[in-house]
Image (spheres, rainbow, N blue to C red):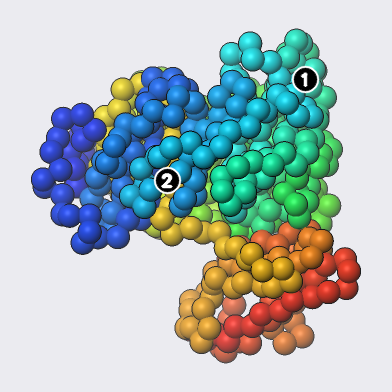
Amino acid sequence: MLSAFRVSGLAGALAFCCTLAAVPPSSAQSTLAHVYVQSSGNSGPVYGYNILSNDTYTLISGSPFKPGTKIVGGTGSKFFTIGKTLLHSFAVGSNGALGSQLSQIGIYNYAGGSCGSTADPVGPQAVLDHTGRSIYVLLQGNGDHLCASFQTFNVNSDGSFTFNGDAQVNEDSGGYASVPSILGNETFAYADNFVPFNNRVIGFRRESSGTLQYNGIVNPTFSGDAGYVPYRPTASPTENFVVLREVLNDTGYPQLGSFSVGSNGALTSTNTASNMPQTNLNVTQTAFSPDGVFLAVAGDNGMGQPGSGLKLYKFNGASPITPISFTVMDPIDQIAWDNSGHLYAMSTIENKLFIFVANSQGLVPLTYFSIPSPVNLVVVSSTASSCGESTVNAVNVCSPTENSTVSSPVKINAAANMNGGVYRFELWSGSTKLISVSYSGVMNQSLPLAPGTYHLIFVARNTLGQKATATRDITVK
């Protein structure tokens, strides 16, 4: 258990007992992320922390905040919550403080509302896409749970919402669905459609407008898959891969499989039943690091019990996932990353939020905060991983920068905006196509390149025959 390690930076009980005098002034350090932990239920107070570049931590001024509804996610300027009937947006100050409400919208006023019920004890669930421009709301639990609705709400610049359609999925009696996990290039998304004693992975195609369209039941295949049941798809933020928890005979701890995403959204794997790593955890959540290099796996099977802990894995693309470390034995319920390599892990049993730094050797503990009855965790990086383009028929390349010298794999982060939506977004080096994204204006991937100089050409096209381009000259060392 981590209770024995020494706390660096602030003391563990910062939120409630300790002075900030020992922490260097925040003006001398840049803020890497804002971390929000909700306490005592989905309507409870929200404690906010600034994570600084020298690995110290301060309580955000005005914390705890009281939005009164379940926290969902945020961007640098907006923060989102969901209640029993309404989706909300709040202003965010430069220091991460939650401000006044910007807007709200009734989720039951639109298509798919009949699938949900205000009497459902779980209530509506929501997830923010990688760009921060679309929120997907999951409604279910009405009557015999016979349908689930995945609503799309686009976020406008002033924080207001625009309903943009829904995708409805049939559920068997007693079944439920999970919120979608979205690929980093925003092309496909995947979720669970659980039925008693079984589970089905379902897929969605994401239109350029942000709307999810149901793509049917996905039947992930791999060598030796007889008897295995797939659960909880976790989509890569940088490449066309999805990690599934594969459970043999639908009992016991899951193994982890890496699946490639086909052009039609199908999932196939070159992994086998014998080389998919065994988690030995009662898994509560899996989460990729934003660069797609690491996969964290959390488990909670009770205090001091086998099956509880936090594991770090190396993600290897289509090759089998490989374990790095298993040194954290605390029961962990939720995890989230920032863009600077910090992993945040929440334990509801221990009433703590742990903070680690991940590297190729494992997880290095930094500190923990004591928080009463934590239930929800949101991390918003100050340096956003997403890239946007507001001008029509234009391409914006956020990474790599012009005339830069970079290491392989090269971080590619670009956005396109085309009249009528993006049909195809490609990256070329001379006559060689390096990346191709369909029906999305987001290109956010890690690209292996041999040492040398490259003239990169980003090309976006729409169905009207129009195209937009941007170039970058780089050197790979």
Residue 396 in view (yes/no): yes
Identified at 64% across, 15% down, the residue is: 118
Residue 195 in view (yes/no): no
Identified at 22% across, 59% down, the residue is: 27
How many numbered circles does the render carry? Answer: 2
- Sequence-wise first label, 2 or 1: 2
Q: Position of residue 418 (x, y in %)?
A: 76, 66
Residue tagged 1: 114
Rendered view: 115 above or below 299: above
Identified at 48% across, 36% down, the residue is: 101
Rendered view: 9 above or below 117: below
Q: Position of residue 254 (x, y in %)?
A: 59, 32
Answer few, some or many: residues within 10 Å of disc 2's Cα (few below 14, many 20 plus, some between 14 and 19).
Answer: some
Q: Please state if 88 lies on the left or on the right of 98 as rendered.
A: right
Q: Residue furthest left?
A: 21
Q: Please state if 305 lies on the left or on the right of 447 as rendered.
A: left
Q: Position of residue 401 (x, y in %)?
A: 51, 78
Residue tagged 2: 92
Identified at 69% across, 73% down, the residue is: 394
Label 2 to label 1: alpha-carbon separation: 33 Å
Answer few, some or many: residues within 10 Å of disc 1's Cα (few below 14, many 20 plus, some between 14 and 19).
Answer: some
Nearer to the camera, 465 or 349: 465
Asked if the residue at tag 1 contacts the one at tag 2, i.e. Cβ–Cβ closer than 8 Å, the answer is no
Rendered view: 351 above or below 2: above
Nearer to the camera, 304 or 385: 385
Amino acid type at mark 1: Ser
